[in-house]
C-alpha cells in the first residue's frame, strides 16, 4: 500500500516538475511578446491563464514522453 502511494507521489511530482518548467517557458515567451507589443492588463490576465493551461499540458506530455523513452531504453 505504501509502495503504491510512493509510486503515485513520485509520478505526480515528476508531472508537477515538468509542468513548472512548461509554465515558466510559456510565461517567458508570452512576456517577451507582450513586452515588445505593449499589451494591457486584460491581456496579461489571459496570458497567465493560458500559461497555466499550456504549462500543465506540456508537463503531462513531457512526462509521458519521458516514461516512453525510458521504457524503450535497452538495459544490458
Image (cartoon, rainbow, N blue to C red):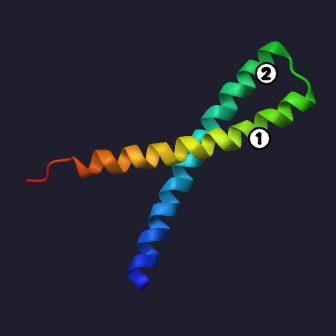
Element assignment for label 1: helix
Element assignment for label 2: helix
In-image side of 67 versus 14 (left or right): left
The mark total stands at: 2
Residue at 79% of width from left, 20% of height from top? 35
Q: Using the image as rendered, state which of residue 68 and residue 33 is in the foreground.
A: 68
Residue 19 in the image, given as x and y percentages of width and height: 57, 47
Residue at 78% of width from left, 14% of height from top? 36
In the rendered image, the vertical position of residue 70 relative to residue 45, given as above or below: below
In-image side of 64 versus 46 (left or right): left
> Mark 2, mark 1: which one is toward the viewer?
1
Residue 68 in the image, given as x and y percentages of width and height: 32, 47
Residue 17 in the image, given as x and y percentages of width and height: 54, 52
Residue at 73% of width from left, 19% of height from top? 33
In the rendered image, the vertical position of residue 27 relative to residue 56, given as above or below: above
In-image side of 6 versus 75 (left or right): right
Looking at marks 2 and 1 on the same chain, the residue that comes earlier in the sequence is marked by 2
Give the spatial CA distance, label 2 vs label 1.
15 Å
Residue at 57% of width from left, 43% of height from top? 57
For label 2, the residue is 34
Residue 30 in the image, given as x and y percentages of width and height: 71, 26
In-image side of 22 versus 6 (left or right): right
Q: Given contact means CB atoms under 8 Å apart, are the residues at marks 2 and 1 in contact? A: no
For label 1, the residue is 49
Q: Which mark is residue 76?
A: none
Amino acid at each position: 500500500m505504501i509502495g503504491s502511494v510512493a509510486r503515485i507521489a513520485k509520478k505526480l511530482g515528476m508531472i508537477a516538475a515538468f509542468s513548472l518548467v512548461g509554465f515558466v517557458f510559456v510565461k517567458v515567451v508570452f512576456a517577451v511578446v507582450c513586452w515588445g507589443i505593449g499589451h494591457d492588463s486584460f491581456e496579461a490576465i489571459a496570458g497567465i491563464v493560458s500559461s497555466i493551461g499550456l504549462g500543465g499540458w506540456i508537463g503531462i506530455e513531457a512526462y509521458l514522453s519521458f516514461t516512453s523513452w525510458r521504457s524503450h531504453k535497452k538495459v544490458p
